[in-house]
Image (cartoon, rainbow, N blue to C red):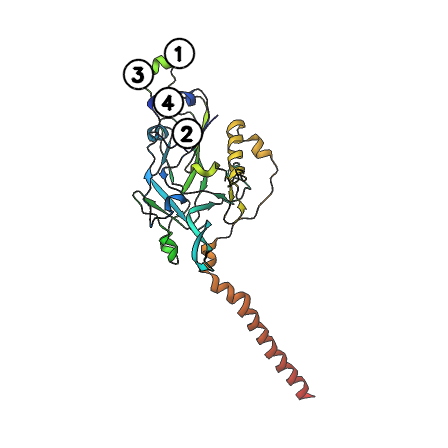
Amino acid sequence: MLIVAKPTQAFSEKDKFKLDQYVMNGGKMLWMVDRMGINLDSLRGVPYFVPQDYPLNIEDLLYKYGFRVEPNLLADRQCSKIPLVVGQQGGQNQYDLFDWYYHPVITPPAVNPHPVVKSIGGVNLHFPSTIDTIKTKTPLKKTVLLTSSGFSKTQYSPVRVSYDILRYEPEPSWFNKKNLPVAVMAEGVFPSNYANRVSEEMTATLQEIGTPFRAESVENKIVVISDGDIAKNLITADGSYQPLGFNQFNERTYANKDFLVNTVEYMFDNGGIIQARDKDIKLRLMDRAKIEQTRGLWQFINIVLPLLFLGIFAIIFNFLRRRKYARS
């Protein structure tokens, strides 16, 4: 199995041909790809930042296998927080935590989840893009493993990213898309990206290792995740590292490691271990956007309504009591 984690430089045609024939001969691949070049450090000391596409030169390869990572950024109301300066006190900066929509927390579906994501918690992504599935020459089974929440949106390149988005209370109309794919798996027979166009150099490369050219793969699996940082451990100032998925701002560990380990195990053993494993059920994140929309209703039900019932009971009780003793 080959894991390609956050490439930032272009692949040569020779390397792409090697990867293609690796897949054709049964090699499994896990791609963790950042389409847009941006991180939190990009916004440090500047009013805004315009991310550019990474020139990876793998778009045709992934397209042939049924994937297209879109040149956009996903923003989601269900997200983790980042600290920002809100003032000063005693000469020291004062910080507060704010929702950062470009760091979505992806919760797997509760109904009929795939074995890879069954019973795992939220997965924290950093500046992901959306993934489209493409019809291929050979039949492939495509499964969306992770999607955005019901309150998300996309911003296509060129896009200006800044902290100004946090100045305003988000309107529901801003986040009007839902279930946008960010991790997709394809299973089956993959077509070669180089069918009917093998050069002499490519032929010589295959002859060196004694392998014939294959135009179609054996039964295989490929997974594409639109975030290269999903497998990145936080390195602290003293050189130590935190667990995979740890968020230093809210000091919470998300299920990034569980998701990646499950993905690798499923790709290797057809899901036998995944399905047989007895997993703990973890609490899901609440739908924060829905909570805000219905806050007044639930406050009325939990605070006003009990007092109203108590008042009605007191009136009826006093009425019956007076009526009883008046007769006496």
Query: Mark 2 against mark 1, which lies toward the viewer?
Result: 1
- Residue at which label 3 appears: 199
Residue 311 is at least partly visible in this image:
yes
Badge 2 crowding class, 10 Å Cα cut-off, few under 14, some 14 to 19, many 20 or more, is: many
| C-beta proximity under 8 Å, tags 2 and 1 | no
Q: Amino acid at mark 3?
A: Ser
Which residue is pictured at 30% across the width and 16% down the height? 199
Check the image and report above or below for 134 versus 296. Answer: above
Which of pointers 2 and 3 lies earlier in the amino acid sequence? 2
- Residue at which label 1 appears: 208
**Which numbered disc covers residue 140?**
2
How far is disc 3 from disc 4 in space, using C-alphas? 14 Å
- Residue at which label 4 appears: 15
| C-beta proximity under 8 Å, tags 4 and 1 | no
Check the image and report above or below for 271 versus 212. Answer: below
| C-beta proximity under 8 Å, tags 2 and 3 | no
Judged from the image, the secondary structure of the residue bearing numbered disc 3 is loop
| C-beta proximity under 8 Å, tags 3 and 4 | no
